Amino acid sequence: SLQFLVRLIHTFKLCFGVYTKFLTHPLPTGGYYSTVLPAILAVWIASYIERGARKLIPDVVKLFLVPFVTLLLAVPVTFLVVGPVGNVLSDALSWFFQFIMGISPVLYGVVLGGFWQVMVMFGMHWAIVPLAIVETASQGFSAILVPALFPSFTQVGVLLAIVLKSKEAKVKSLSLPALISAIFGITEPAIYGITLPMRTPFIVSCMVSALIGGYVMFAGIVAYSVGGLGIFLYPSLIDTSNGSMSGVISSIIASVAALVISFGAQMALPVANLYGDGVLEEKEDEPMSLLKEIQQEIVASPLEGTILSLADVPDPVFASGAMGKGLAIEPSQNILYAPAKGEITLLFPSKHALGMRTEDGAEILFHIGMDTVSLQGAGFESFVEVGDRIEVGQKLLAFDIEKIREAGLPVTTPIIITNTSLYKDILVSQEKAVQVGDYLLTTVR
């Protein structure tokens, strides 16, 4: 019985060390890689942690510190709370299906067939798969997974109807290869690309799968091995003791019925537009409309000197792009000017680094030299304070180039867009030398 199998699997875990420990907390040795539900819960929790971190962490270090803090807090929570909760839900699901099977195998087939595709989406189907594997190994056959073998054919049926009824060229071009994949048991392109976004086809597929699931349990079809899906399911239904093909014949009838019923149901229902207005051809002016949506901001050079790529900056934090995209300037004069209108958002007490936000939203960090914080402000003079409104060309900082070099420190000055993640691209000047006010970079939204 299912109850016996659940207990057997639990005993196997306890006896053969399937569990390990993390901070004295028992965890599955393999982690939670085989289930999607813990991942979804983990990302949901991490989203709240990220929001809080973005509010508390200064803009200048937000790009690399927010992901770090999010992972630092989300990973332990995932291992200690989210993962075990997912396991509890899986165990509860196993016991639920055990209860349904005890009431009626046909009802079990209806419920499992109808909800199988939803369970797969959340990774909860792994609560059922081990039961089928253990039962097949112990008695040579199993009916536990049989209702789950036919949703691929209901997906084929609704996809065929969508190919015939949809007015969208893109939907037609996506549905046909997804249909072919579903024939061979791979339904992810169909579900995530077409039927689930359209909703109604997915519901039709689930309802017909429930009907077929009840039929196959009523017909007494069993699997003699845990095999594939789609057309690859038939070999697993051959009776290995006497070679009987009765299960294969019954399953072919069920497959055809699943395809025909789901096709007919979807043909009787409207097909929603998925990508646009339902026209077969793209609008001629679409490229122009896309260009209009692109927002650019040009940033002038705040320094005179030689332009360097970030990769040439002698500091791995800047060179790796962890702080954001941008470039660097080897200055030949000692004044930092405002490259755009905006507001001062950051000024280090040592005055070696300054941050601003332009009127169009670009957050720019200017870091004069490398490790110049060690000078503790010696050789630096600030002409602005945090909160000041600034104009293009306004003096921001003065710095003593010779004093910095005498301390054995590079004067290389990175200019970073710290909110790079908000932009599609950051385009930088390809010139070698630059004057104050020359073109330096462009932000592209």
Image: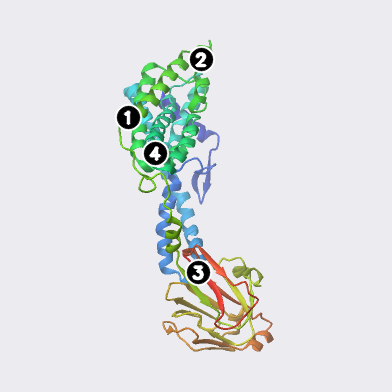
Residue 433 drawn above or below residue 335: above
Q: Residues within 10 Å of mark 2 (few under 14, many from 20)?
A: some
Q: Which residue is mark 4?
A: 195
Q: Of label 2 and label 3, which has the lower sequence position?
A: 2
Foreground label between 2 and 1 = 1
Q: Which residue is mark 3?
A: 443
Residue 64 visible somewhere in the drawing: no
* Gap between marks 2 and 1 measured at Cα: 34 Å
Choose between 338 and 381: the one closer to the eye: 338
Q: Confirm or deny contact between disc 2 and disc 1 (CB under 8 A).
A: no
* Gap between marks 2 and 3 measured at Cα: 66 Å
Residue 230 visible somewhere in the drawing: yes
Kindly identify the residue that appears in the image at 54 percent across and 41 percent down: 30
* Mark carried by residue 239: 2
Q: Which residue is mark 1?
A: 265
Residue 286 drawn above or below residue 338: above
Kindly identify the residue that appears in the image at 51 percent across and 29 percent down: 184
Q: Which residue of the protein is positioned furthest toward the front in this rendering?
A: 284
Residue 125 spot, x, y in % from top left: 43, 35
User: Label 3 is placed on what type of residue?
Assistant: Thr
